[in-house]
Amino acid sequence: MTIEATLERIANGLETIAAGGGFPTDAKPAEKKPDQKASKPPAKDKKQTVGKVHDEAEAEHTKEEVRAKLQAVQKKTTPAQAKSILKAHGASTIGNLAVSRYAQVMADCDAVLDE
């Protein structure tokens, strides 16, 4: 088969699909074979677990809630105050903060906001 004939066949197939006609009669989609790996749970990426003590499902607060609370502290006081709360719990950013520390950070933020 020549390149021109192949390109013509591809163009015809694309036109048929674009017109809503599905796959052309001479080209059928590949049949899906049963996935043998589907029964295994996917392995966790090591990069995702660095710095996390527990799963986020176990945390009573989410990263977004902690971020919002720290932003509230920052608006009421200073950015340095919010950073000092993070540093007190061993993190320089929220991304480095261990999930097990979320509740403690939220409590510290509440204490500052209640002043």
Image (cartoon, grey):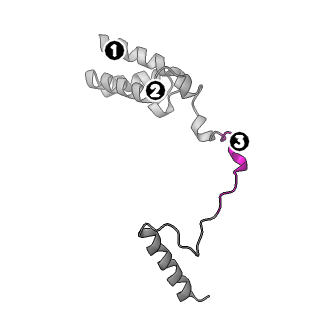
Q: For the residues marked 3 and 1, what is the alpha-carbon distance in whole angstroms?
A: 49 Å
Majority secondary structure in the magenta region = loop
* 56 left or right, relative to 62: right
Depth order, front residue of 18/25: 25
Depth-wise, is mark 3 or mark 1 nearer the camera? 3
Residue at horizontal 64%, vertical 39%? Answer: 44
Which range of residues does the magenta coloring cover? 31-43
* 95 left or right, relative to 114: right
Depth order, front residue of 6/27: 27
Q: Classify mark 2: helix, strand or loop.
A: loop
* 111 left or right, relative to 54: left
Q: Classify mark 3: helix, strand or loop.
A: helix
Q: Is residue 27 above or below residue 57?
A: below
Position in image of residue 15 (x %, y %): 44, 74
Position in image of residue 40 (x %, y %): 71, 41
Q: Residues within 10 Å of mark 3 (few under 14, many from 20)?
A: few
Q: For the residues marked 2 and 1, what is the alpha-carbon distance in whole angstroms?
A: 20 Å
Q: Is 35 inside the magenta-drawn segment?
A: yes
Quarter where residue 84 is shown? top left
Determine contact: label 2, label 1, CB under 8 Å: no
Q: Amino acid at mark 3?
A: Ser
Looking at the figure, which quarter contains the N terminus? bottom right
* 105 left or right, relative to 52: left
Q: Is residue 8 above or below residue 68?
A: below
Q: Mark 3 or mark 1: name the one nearer the start of the chain.
A: 3
Q: Amino acid at mark 2?
A: Thr
Count every numbered label the image shows and give the total. Answer: 3
Q: Which mark is residue 112?
A: 1
Quarter where residue 66 is shown? top left
Determine contact: label 3, label 1, CB under 8 Å: no
Position in image of residue 11 (x %, y %): 47, 79
